[in-house]
Amino acid sequence: MPILFIIFIVVPMVEIALFIQAGDWFGLAPTLLMIILTAVIGITLLRQQGLSTLYKAQQKMNQGEIPAMEMVEGILLAIAGALLITPGFFTDTVGFLLLIPTFRHYLFKSVLKNKIYMHVQAKHPDFDDFHTQKDPQHNRIIDGEFKNTDD
């Protein structure tokens, strides 16, 4: 409930306040021009980043790997696109932040990865991290299950 309150009440109030302030500082025409310009620049950057992410995902799939990070990046880029199309300086700022690959990686590693793990843990209580082992030769995690057929 608080997130919906923030999205539908607080964000528009912040945007209105920023529009009023920008209109006061720059005037009506430059403010409207900035809104249009940020949307055009944002969509151009979004298209470029989206194609790059799609290309990286295809490369990982061709190598037989799961493109988990690329899928999360795709979702974050879709959110960035929605924010950049929405008129406003606050939403444009958040949208542009989501276009920065370093910020997306930070967001994934610090926030989303833990939430995804906790969600999987809640849905599947028998899932744990103790089934993973490090492969010392390649320094990567190998996860698997086995079935004893010697019986």
Image (cartoon, rainbow, N blue to C red):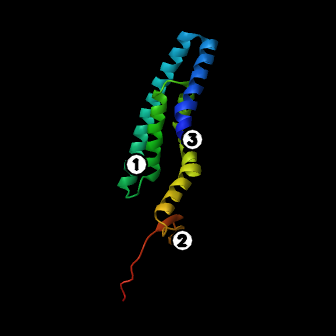
Question: Badge 2 is on which residue?
Answer: 130
What residue is at 52 percent from the left and 32 percent from the top? 8
Crowd rating for badge 2 (residues with CA inside 10 Å; few <14, some 14–19, many 20+): few
x%, y% of residue 55?
39, 44
* Front-most of residues 64 and 76: 76
Dot 1 or dot 3: first in sequence order is 3
Give the Cα separation between the discs numbered 2 and 1.
28 Å
What residue is at 48 percent from the left and 41 percent from the top? 76
x%, y% of residue 85?
45, 27
* Label disc, if present, on residue 151 of the rendered structure: none
Tag 2's secondary structure? helix
x%, y% of residue 67?
42, 52
Dot 3 or dot 2: first in sequence order is 3
Dot 2 or dot 1: first in sequence order is 1
Crowd rating for badge 1 (residues with CA inside 10 Å; few <14, some 14–19, many 20+): many
The amino acid type, in three-letter code, at marker 3 is: Pro
**In-image side of 19 versus 87 (left or right):** right
Tag 3's secondary structure? helix
The amino acid type, in three-letter code, at marker 1 is: Ala
Tag 1's secondary structure? helix
Question: Badge 1 is on which residue?
Answer: 57
